[in-house]
Amino acid sequence: MIIPNKRDLNIVNTPTLETDRLLLRKFNEGDLNAMLKMFGDKEINKYLPWFPVNNIAEAKEFYENHYLPIYERETAYHYAICLKDKEPIGWVNVSVEESMDLGYGLIKEY
């Protein structure tokens, strides 16, 4: 597993993390189908502050509005959870704001 040096945590944005089974990385535009599956499921998103996305265009808009701006920040931790060599099966976000919120979601199969 790759773990960032503690002193570097204030100057990183979603560094890739890898275990024997998982890869945590930034979302990219190639993940839109997976994002539609994750963020389009009403049950998974029932208590989240966004409405489920209904199609690829909305998934792209969600990616552009909720992930790209965060990836431009100096420090952030907003990950796609992937099985090795697979599309994302979930997401995990850790806030660097005062609240230090942690949120995650997985597609139902996982």
Image (spheres, rainbow, N blue to C red):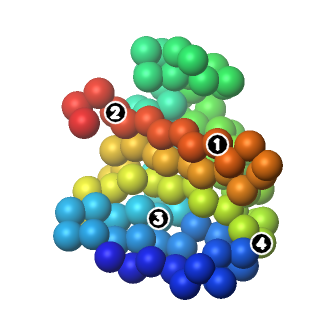
* Count of all numbered marks drawn on residues in the image: 4
Q: Is residue 98 left or right of residue 8?
A: right
The answer to whether 66 is drawn above or below residue 106 in the figure is below
The residue at which mark 2 appears reads as 107
Q: Is residue 90 left or right of residue 72?
A: left
**Residue 1 position within the rendered picture, expressed as x and y whole percent measured from the top left:** 32, 76
The residue at which mark 1 appears reads as 101
What whole-number distance in Å separates the C-alpha atoms at marks 3 and 2? 17 Å
**Amino acid under disc 2:** Ile
**Amino acid under disc 3:** Arg
Pointer 3 or 2: first along the chain: 3
In this view, the mark in front (4 or 2): 4
Q: Quadrant of residue 73?
A: bottom right
The answer to whether 34 is drawn above or below residue 37 in the figure is below
Image point (34%, 71%), residue name: 18
> Which numbered circle lies on residue 40?
none
Under circle 4, the secondary element is loop
Image point (59%, 79%), residue name: 6
The residue at which mark 4 appears reads as 74
| Mark 1 vs 2: CB contact within 8 A | no
Answer few, some or many: residues within 10 Å of disc 1's Cα (few below 14, many 20 plus, some between 14 and 19): few
**Amino acid under disc 4:** Glu
> Which numbered circle lies on residue 25?
3
| Mark 3 vs 2: CB contact within 8 A | no
| Mark 3 vs 4: CB contact within 8 A | no
Pointer 1 or 2: first along the chain: 1
